[in-house]
Amino acid sequence: MSQKIIPVHSDDKHTHEHAGGRACMSRRQWLLSGGSSLLMVSLGGLPGLADAAQALKATYPRQKIGNLSALKEGVPVDFNYPYPDVRNILVKLGVPAGAGVGVSKDIVAFNQQCTHMGGPLDGTYKPQHQVLGPCPLHLTTFDLTHHGMVASGHATESLPQIVLEVKGDDIYAVGVMGLVYGYNAMTAERSA
Ligand code: FES
């Protein structure tokens, strides 16, 4: 099947202009903006990143995981959901993000197990770039502003994103978009 990649990014925050009005984007900005900057075109058509994530969305009993008033920008909070062995972070990125909640749509939550081979991403959040990683095993880095998509490295799957809801000052986890490493479905049973 023939396939081509067309850059279509138009987000001002990822560009600047040289004298003469020519817009420019750094390599890092290009990599980190991939979710909105690349349009995958094929003969059969491909679903968008958000659509694909939504297709794998599973709902679970609501669990309170934090308070808006207690969250500090750039400082992740650990929590386990939907099972005791599934480690995640809740973080206020400081910039709007896909599926972000809160007034600025910048509060997100993600699983901390690398989708490549399950490497531990705990403690690897980089607030200056809003990424999780690099993974200590093979260096994959995930962009938390774009549904946890791979910014660089070996993994091919986005990081599972925890679906959030806000009620008053309370933040709740209510579901998971994507498969946590080690599960072949988001049931309580791990795959062998
Ligand atoms: S396990 Fe994380 S990059 Fe391989």
Image (cartoon, grey):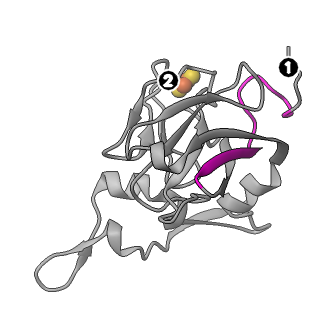
**Mark 1 is on which residue type?**
Ser
Ligand 1 within 8 Å, label 2 CB: no
189 within the magenta span: no
Residue at x 47%, y 49% (from the top left corner): 69
Query: Which of the image's four quarters has the C terminus?
Result: top right
- Ligand 1's image quarter is top right
Q: Residue 59: percent from the left, percent from the top?
A: 84, 46
Residue at x 38%, y 58% (from the top left corner): 30
Say if mark 2 contacts mark 1, CB within 8 Å: no
Residue at x 68%, y 46% (from the top left corner): 172
Residue 18 falls left or right of residue 55: left
Q: State which quadrant residue 64 falls in.
A: top right
Magenta region:
169-186
In the rendered image, the vertical position of residue 43 relative to residue 137, given as above or below: below
Q: Residue 102: percent from the left, percent from the top?
A: 54, 60
Q: Nearer the viewer, mark 2 or mark 1?
A: 2
178 within the magenta span: yes
Q: Which residue is mark 1?
A: 191
Q: Residue 162: percent from the left, percent from the top?
A: 67, 44
Residue at x 60%, y 39% (from the top left corner): 110
In the rendered image, the vertical position of residue 64 relative to residue 112, given as above or below: below
Q: Say whether residue 156 is visible.
A: no
Q: Which residue is mark 2?
A: 122
SS state under label 2: loop
Q: State which quadrant residue 19 falls in.
A: bottom left
Dot label at residue 11: none
Query: Which of the image's four quarters has the N terminus?
Result: bottom right
**Mark 2 is on which residue type?**
Asp
Between marks 2 and 1, how big is the CA–CA gap? 22 Å
